[in-house]
Image (spheres, rainbow, N blue to C red):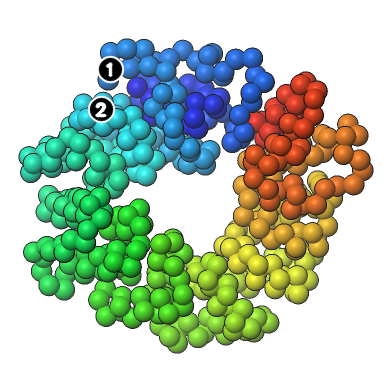
Amino acid sequence: MYTTLILNGRRCLVLQKWPNLRFAVSLVQNVSAFSNPFSSASAAADVSPPQDGRKGKTFNVFDLVDSLDLTRKLAESISRKVSSDGKGDPDSVLNLLTSNGFTDSQISSIITVYPRLLMLDAEKSLGPKLQFLQSRGASTSELTEILSKVPTILARKGEKTISIYYDFVKEIVEADKSSKYVKLCHSLPQGSKQENKLRNILALRELGVPQKLLFSLLVSDFRSISGKERFEESLKKVLDMGFDPTTSKFVQALHAVYQMSDKTIEEKVNIYKRLGFDVEDVWGMFKKFPQFLIYSEQKIVNKVETFLGLGFSRDELAMMVKRFPQLLGCSSETLMKKTEFVVEKMNWSLKAVASNPAVFGYNFEKRIVPRCNVIKTLMSKGLMGSELPPMSLVLAITDEAFLTKFVRKYDDKELVAELMTILTKGRVS
């Protein structure tokens, strides 16, 4: 058995031993989302597939997640959590899930959402919870579907709490399948946290908030969906602002508004006014990135100082923040690293960066560095002339568009293979 997750069987893997895990797979450094169609053999061919105790056959390490698109960051995070915890037996957890009817794709989904499930004690913790749900009449298909959608139900303690959340999700799923509104009633103490949470989530469901967001809220500890009058007031404000309930920004705005009183919101707006923003600008940024309004004045000032220290003018900073307020959430280290790379390594101007602030939201190792290295390689070979392409043309287009424009257009197969190697290795040069 193994416990790592990878993208579509295309990525290179190396096996390594962990104290409490029979088989494990970790991502090779510098993996990119691009596949290399010119490699002579799959990297997996060099990895001896572990024996799968679940099904009594040789099991290829790619099979479990052949349809799961995981980012490198997530896969590495899961690996660190499992290997460093030192508790439980991930192998036993995976075997237990399989024996209870969960498919490979369902297990992949569960581990992606709730990687700490692998650290649970299969015999003392996870097993009894599954047995309890089955004892209440849950069929195998129902059990696997519900827990695949909301695996963090298994993190809850107490049979009553698990029952309440499980039944709630089940009713929502069944109601949505039939496309009929079902009045969900639960005998919970009036005014209790759980009663408020279920009522509020139902209100959000009626507004069109998707299942995925609803169920995440259900098992969260956010105060914004556990209140009553405050929740209703916050919900009205967010709706009046024009947020679309079907988007994640709606939920983010609800969290932000719930956390702040009208006085606090006014104080936050005044901070940005002192920095030269109009009130209309502030609310325009809030629509793009609701979290930015909860930042402390010190954090905002620190970001301003970082940008000014990098050489941007106050006018350029204001323009960037209006276009891409998410950059205020980036660490100063990230802002400096990306700016220095595109300016010093690629020779794009600060003005070009200011005109393309979304660059601060792109993945440095998987997008910025590999693409820039392809461009530098083409220029060094005299295939692009001496003029650097616009930053937006290199970094803002989709993966497929980049491949078409800068890689696959060449008839030289050796050159194309070289460019693909640069993309897949994502090396910094």
Q: Nearer the viewer, residue 264 or 194?
A: 194
| Amino acid beneath label 1 | Lys
- Residue 260 visible from this viewpoint: no
The residue that disc 1 covers is 55
Residue in the image at 92% along x and 43% along y: 386
Residue in the image at 12% along x and 72% along y: 190
User: Dot 1: what SS?
Assistant: loop
Q: Residues within 10 Å of mark 1 (few under 14, many from 20)?
A: few
Residue in the image at 39% along x and 27% along y: 64
Tell me where residue 337 appears, x and y as whole percent. Answer: 70, 51
Tell me where residue 344 appears, x and y as whole percent. Answer: 82, 50
Residue 243 sits in quarter = bottom left
Q: Nearer the viewer, residue 273 or 306?
A: 273
24 left or right of 415 in image: left
User: 326 above or below 345?
Assistant: below
User: Dot 2: what SS?
Assistant: helix
| Amino acid beneath label 2 | Thr
Asked if marks 1 and 2 touch (Cβ < 8 Å), the reply is: yes
Residue 103 sits in quarter = top left
Quadrant holding the N terminus: top left
Q: Earlier in the sequence, mark 1 or mark 2?
A: 1
The residue that disc 2 covers is 98
User: 186 above or below 7?
Assistant: below
